[in-house]
Amino acid sequence: MKNIVAGHIAASTAEFVELALGTPVELWLGVEGESEMERAARMDAARDILADNPDFPDRVSQVAAEAIEAFAPELFNVVSLPRPVGRRLPSRKAAA
């Protein structure tokens, strides 16, 4: 199966994410062993990208949700937890 994003074929998962987001993942997550100067430069670039693209966090959320849905849909299985027995919530009347 080919992973095509914006007309490009992604050769790896990392490349797929980079194509979907339009930026390398390392820009946001950093790289092991980076210096303080490299980190500061990376953070400056990230701030510039966020300032120029206010919808970027929404795009990231969408890509993450689509990846979860495709590769780990069980993470979206939400069940209600039973209420603890014998434990009462405070009355709303008492709060008023």
Image (spheres, grey):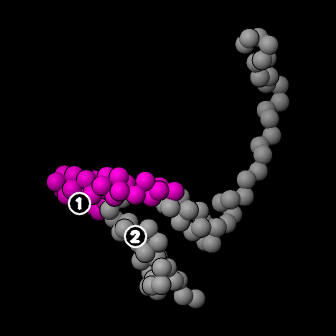
Point out the image quarter for the C terminus. top right
Reply above or below: 22 against 45: below
- Can you tell which of label 1 and label 2 is closer to the viewer? 2
For badge 1, the amino acid type reads: Gly
Residue 64 shows up from this direction:
no
Q: Which residues are magenta?
A: 29-58
**Residue 24 sits in quarter:** bottom left
Q: Which mark is residue 22?
A: 2
Q: As drawn, which residue projects farthest toward the bottom?
A: 1
Label 1, secondary structure: give it: loop
Q: Residue at x 53, y 83 (%)?
A: 3
**Picture coordinates of residue 15 (x, y %)?**
41, 77
Callout 1 touching callout 2 (CB < 8 Å): no
With respect to residue 12, does 24 lie above or below? above
Q: Is residue 4 left or right of residue 92?
A: left
Q: Is residue 93 visible?
A: yes
